Image: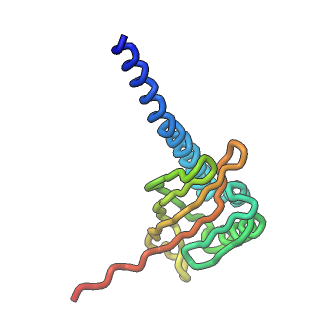
Amino acid sequence: MHKSVFATLLVGLLLVISIPTFGQTSTEDAIRSRVRQYEAASNAGNTDSMAVIYAVNGTHTFANGVTLRGRFEIAKGLKEQYAGMLKGTRMAITPLHIRPLSTEIAVEEASFVLSGLKGAGGAELPPVNGLCLVVYQKDGDQWYIAAAQCMVPPPPPHEK
């Protein structure tokens, strides 16, 4: 009889422990999917598809220091950037760590590589490597970017 009670308690404990893991995997998968959508839209130059991934009142601070507030302003800014300096570029985003903070908020740390930028004379510049911290909020069954802040770390100091 004690073995039966012990087995039942053990199964119950395993279920309780595994429930957050299932939720975390689901959140991570959903956010990774959003990252892939954003990356694909960026590489296609589809700024409308990029903009709808932002929350209506979302913000994005780009690596060049420009901050756009609200989906409408983000959409407008993306159109301008992809008609100009980002035209024809390729973006590769690698989620490094996704951490759910609640059932409706998650944080993603990611790295990115932007290639295909052109210099003033039209020559292709070296790829730009950077980092982003992105806060997602869930609305219904979809995750949206509530805030993104990206930066390009300075080069390491030269040794003498």
Residue occupying the far right of the picture = 72
Residue 45 screen position, x and y as percent: 65, 59
- Asked if residue 108 is positioned above or below residue 65 in the image, the reply reads above
- Asked if residue 133 is positioned above or below residue 68 in the image, the reply reads above
Q: Quadrant of residue 156?
A: bottom left
Residue 61 in view (yes/no): yes
Residue 147 screen position, x and y as percent: 63, 64
* Image point (51%, 43%), residue name: 24
* Image point (43%, 29%), residue name: 13
Residue 11 screen position, x and y as percent: 42, 23
Residue in the foreground of this view, choosing between 100 and 68 = 100
* Image point (50%, 52%), residue name: 99
Residue 152 screen position, x and y as percent: 47, 74
Q: Quadrant of residue 74?
A: bottom right
Left or right: residue 143 versus residue 70 is left
Residue in the foreground of this view, choosing between 13 and 22 = 13
Left or right: residue 137 versus residue 120 is right
